[in-house]
Amino acid sequence: MTDKRITDHPVLGPAPGERLTLWVDDQEIEARSTDTVAGALWANGTTTLRRSRSGQPRGLYCGIGHCFECRVTIDGEPGKRACLMTVRQGMRVETGTEA
Ligand code: FES
């Protein structure tokens, strides 16, 4: 996966947070300890977080926990809202599941 993060903003400075790794669909990605799961996935190029029952791709929409479009499976627990969950070292995330 590709890191699309701005690592050193000309006004805001370097990206905050410690570097850590998590697993997304069995691929290792890098994140920052200040990232939400959704933010880490977007920074690494994953925008489809789940599929609707008809197979349509779904992803980040409201970003504040209201729409439930960003549900993923985290450490084996389905239905977690990626926009509300902060990443942890070694976290396992599954995307693309029907929900
Ligand atoms: S993007 Fe709406 S609940 Fe996560």
Image (cartoon, helix red, strand yellow):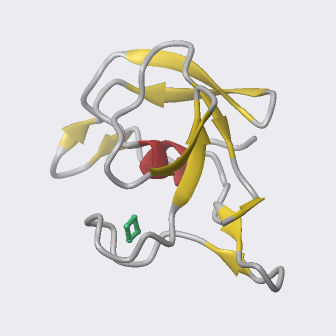
> In which quadrant will I find the C terminus?
bottom right
Viewport quadrant of the N terminus: top right
Q: Is residue 81 left or right of residue 13?
A: right
- Image x and y of residue 25, in percent: 78, 37
Q: Quadrant of residue 97?
A: bottom right
Where is residue 89? Give x, y as percent.
Answer: 48, 13
Q: Nearer the viewer, residue 14 or 77?
A: 77
Picture residue at 66% right of the left edge, 54% below the top = 45
Horizontal and vertical percent for residue 4? 57, 50
Ligand 1 visible in quadrant: bottom left
Question: In terms of depth relative to the viewer, which is nearer, 22 or 51?
Answer: 51
Q: Is residue 88 left or right of residue 42?
A: left
State left or right for residue 74 relative to residue 1: left
Question: Residue 86: x percent and y percent?
Answer: 34, 35
> Which of the 4 image quarters holds residue 68?
bottom left
Q: How many marks?
A: 0
Above or below, comparing residue 49 to residue 29 in the picture: below
Q: Is residue 48 visible?
A: no
Q: Nearer the viewer, residue 51 or 32?
A: 51
Q: Is residue 95 visible?
A: yes
Left or right: residue 63 versus residue 72 is left
Above or below, 96 against 57 in this view is above
